[in-house]
Image (cartoon, grey):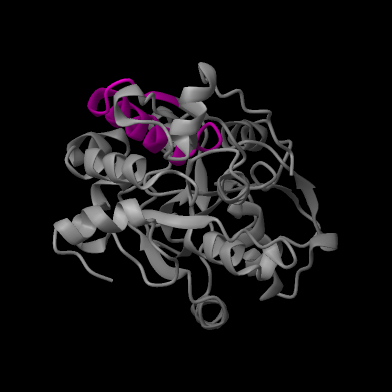
Amino acid sequence: MKNKKISFAIAGAASLLMIFGICPAAEQKVHISIAAGPAGGSYYPLSVGMSEIIHKNIAGAKVDVVNTGGSTENTTMVGAGECEIGITNGDTAYEGFTGTGKYAKKKLPDIRLLYAGIAGGPLHAVVGQASAIKSYAQLKGKKIALGPQGNTTGFLTLAVLKYYGIQKQDLRLSYLNFDEGIQALQDGQVDVTTIIGPLPLPSVKQLATFGRFAFDLISIEEDKAQAFRKDNPFFNVIKIPAAMYGLGHEVKTLSSTNIVIVNAKVSEDVAYRVTKSIFENLSMMHTAHPSGRAIKLENAVIDYLPLHPGAEKYFREKGIKR
């Protein structure tokens, strides 16, 4: 994993003990690092929204938002205890917790659910409007920007292409953050840039707003979409509305599910207070990024990951059960 060393600004042993629920309440100093995501995606502004809520509603809280490669890196960092909280895809978190898929032999049993409900992240395959590329089937041999290493974008793009008979070795790949990938597309350095994130994706919306580069999004064919969905039930088939980016047509694509995870060693009290703060200030999450508008009490709990006891305590108080 291409990882940044996290510096936790913890003042003294009392603060460190608090993170694991040992320090007396009167001496608590809450220090939390949130594994966010790459520039140009949606995870980062959502993480900033969470950090502002925690800082404003939990006295003495210090929150660091950590720029990362995305869902896979976030899952690894939270599971390993390098960050307390992180946003990730449901399938990635499940694989980390169970030690399956990309986490085979790398099981992360300390992953817990804090809450679910963030709008899913559709796969965007962005091409120049003047390009001859109209289908995933035409990507063999092409130059593709896959997003940063450790992001679900690369995993999903390569997984989808297998249903078209295209393997990784058939492609020329670049691992760029989302903004860099869009710029590389405009500069003619790549043929397609793929990005995952809740609608609207900031980097793609910006491209549409400025209108300096005519672009399009590739749709996945129905038979390929349904075959993929059958093999990968954590993903959904959705349509990006025609008006979303002003393309004049709907785009059929696959969408991940997005959740917030927390390390099991975070104290029950801290996890409870964080969950309570967020769900009693949802308007701040709703304005942090449009995908945050989907977060509601009624869709905050899923059944394929264990809830952190602190989050469970809050949801039970609100009458939300698994």
Q: Nearer the viewer, residue 53 or 36?
A: 53
Q: Relative to 166, is 128 on the left or the right?
A: left
In the depicted structure, whether residue 190 falls above or below residue 65: below
Q: Residue furthest top?
A: 11
Instruction: Please tell me whether residue 48 belongs to the stretch shown in magenta.
Output: yes
In the depicted structure, whether residue 293 falls above or below residue 298: above
Q: Residue at x 35, y 39 (%)?
A: 270
Q: Nearer the viewer, residue 148 or 17?
A: 17
In the depicted structure, whether residue 164 falls above or below residue 85: below
Q: Residue at x 83, y 62 (%)?
A: 170
Q: Which quadrant: the C terminus?
A: bottom left
Residue 217 in picture, x, y percent from top left: 51, 53
Q: Tell me, yes or no, if residue 57 can be seen here.
A: yes
Q: Relative to 115, is 44 on the left or the right?
A: right
Q: Nearer the viewer, residue 45 or 261?
A: 261
Q: Residue at x 32, y 20 (%)?
A: 60
In the image, the segment drawn in magenta is 35-63
Instruction: Please tell me whether residue 240 belongs to the stretch shown in magenta.
Output: no
Residue 79 in picture, x, y percent from top left: 58, 51
Residue 305 in picture, x, y percent from top left: 45, 66
Q: Relative to 101, is 304 on the left or the right?
A: left
Q: Tell me, yes or no, if residue 116 can be seen here.
A: no
Q: Nearer the viewer, residue 308 or 99?
A: 308
Residue 6, image quadrant: top right
Tally of numbered discs:
0
Q: Which quadrant: the N terminus?
A: top right
Residue 133 in picture, x, y percent from top left: 64, 57
